[in-house]
Image: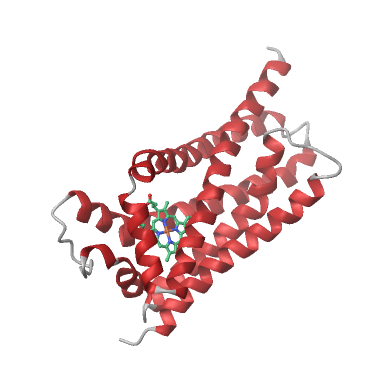
Amino acid sequence: MSTKKQGLSSIGRKVLMALTGFFLMIFLLQHLSINMMSVVSADLFNNVSHFMGANPLVQGLLQPVLIFSVVFHFAWGMYLEYQNNQAREVKYAKYKGSANATWMSRNMIISGLAVLAFLCLHFYDFWIPEIALKYGEGDMSGLIQGTQEFRYHEELVHKFAHQPMRVALYIVAFIMLSLHLLHGFQSAFQSVGFNSNKYTPIIKKLGTAFAILVPLGFIFIALYHYNVHPH
Ligand code: HEM
């Protein structure tokens, strides 16, 4: 069997991981920006959330692409890990220097699984009640119904205010997200073949900044809503 062919297809597999990863990182920035508005002004947050929730382009195109990216990124990541494990068993004796790469990919799988577990909780918290309200009976327990269009801020506060367990779980998840991004950001650039003496060091620094600042922003939002609102 030709090793060249194997090499190419393995790069191809990584490109798909990187492309969905890029999309998810852009989503994270967008999600953080909108959530930050909940700290600045309840009205602004409600208006933007309502726009996102009602806009046909967001709902009909971006949301399906997002769901596809999350599912694909997870399933493909697991598949690549399985394939790496198979290959490692064969190659281990030859390439002992691969121990470091093994540790990195272990780290990605563990942090990735933690983020996935978080997403299950997160969907239970916000997304399922939202979908049920929009397309179903609209009367799920745990969902506060204010005036329909302006309930978003109220719901968000309700989830975090004086809820130490939920806030703690979210914070652990954001730290795992940070670990995932610390490797994932620059690795995605590598996988699409971006390699330059001039720009690669800048991308690595940018990746570190992104991986620390974005999860920190989410931590700030969770802590803010935990603390600021009286019962
Ligand atoms: C304090 C931090 C966060 C808050 C307060 C928050 C809040 C929300 C809210 C209110 C929604 C529902 C939007 C709707 O009305 O449909 C939502 C959806 C979602 N969140 Fe978060 N989120 C946080 C962090 C995160 C993180 C770190 C991730 C990813 C790792 C994430 C991924 C998602 C996804 C995939 C959706 C579904 C998007 C959609 O509506 O299509 N969230 N979040």
Compared to 144, does 188 lie above or below?
A: above
Q: Residue at x 51, y 35 (%)?
A: 76
Q: Residue furthest top?
A: 1
Quadrant of the image occupied by residue 177? bottom right
The image shows residue 124 at horizontal and vertical percentages of: 31, 58
Is residue 114 shown to the viewer in this render? no
The image shows residue 18 at horizontal and vertical percentages of: 60, 38
In depth, the one of 86 and 147 nearer the eye is 147
Q: Residue at x 40, y 42 (%)?
A: 67
In depth, the one of 207 and 95 nearer the eye is 207
In depth, the one of 105 and 196 nearer the eye is 196
Q: Residue at x 62, y 51 (%)?
A: 107
Compared to 178, does 154 lie above or below?
A: below
Compared across the picture, whether 19 is left or right of 96 comes to left
Question: From the image, which quarter does the N terminus lie in?
Answer: top right
Compared across the picture, whether 63 is left or right of 216 comes to left
Question: From the image, which quarter does the C terminus lie in?
Answer: bottom left
Quadrant observed for ligand 1 in the rendered image: bottom left
The image shows residue 170 at horizontal and vertical percentages of: 46, 67
Colour pattern of the rendering:
secondary structure
Compared to 185, does 208 lie above or below?
A: below
Is residue 19 shown to the viewer in this render? yes
The image shows residue 98 at horizontal and vertical percentages of: 75, 40
